[in-house]
Image (spheres, rainbow, N blue to C red):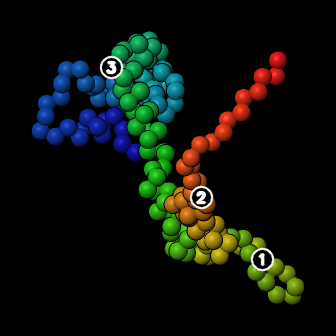
Amino acid sequence: MLGVIDMIKGIKGKERKREELNTRQALFVDYYIQTGNATESAKKAGYSERSAMAIGCELLRNAKIQAAIATRLKQLESERIAEDKEILEYITAVMRGETTEEVVMNIGTGKGYTKAEKVTSKVSAKERLKAAEMLAKVRGMFITRQEIDLQGSIPVVIRDDF
């Protein structure tokens, strides 16, 4: 997970512009996104404990800080949401049996006793079939197509019920 600090460090060969955040401000943004607490974030970013509350409030009113928080939240949101290609690749891997899952199995220990253990196994045939069905639906393989010939006229009757 890249933070604001990583983004600032990623600027190679360029001199940081005046409107960019300094290191403590960037740390504040990262900690604020994690905690939602301005005072705690200011302390973790390196501001003094005595002034952390005031500085935290002041930083939250700063337009550059607000923009950095909004940008970072948007970036985190996009990282969490799977892209179409990623979803299709996963479903295809399940269908082909390339993925595994953990299942709980009762394993005999002797003398009529069993012990439940987690075992890693390939995805079941049922799950593979479901994945194949999902892929077929996405690709439109189950759509029944009918051609309707609309040549000629179609009578329309309008009744007045008043």
Figure disc tally: 3
Lateral position of residue 55 relative to residue 107, left or right: left
Separation (CA) of disc 2 from disc 3: 58 Å
Q: Is residue 23 visible?
A: yes
Q: Secondary structure at mark 1?
A: strand
Mark 2 highlights which residue? 146
The label shown at residue 143 is none
Q: Tag 3 or tag 1, which sits nearer the N-term?
A: 3
Kind of residue at badge 1: Asn
Kind of residue at badge 2: Gln
Mark 1 highlights which residue? 106
Residue at x 50%, y 56% (from the top left corner): 87
Quarter-of-image position of residue 24: top left
Q: Tag 1 or tag 2, which sits nearer the N-term?
A: 1
Pointers 1 and 3 in contact (C-beta within 8 Å): no
Separation (CA) of disc 2 from disc 1: 51 Å
Q: Residues within 10 Å of mark 1 (few under 14, many from 20)?
A: few
Q: Tag 3 or tag 2, which sits nearer the N-term?
A: 3
Mark 3 highlights which residue? 64
Q: Secondary structure at mark 2?
A: loop
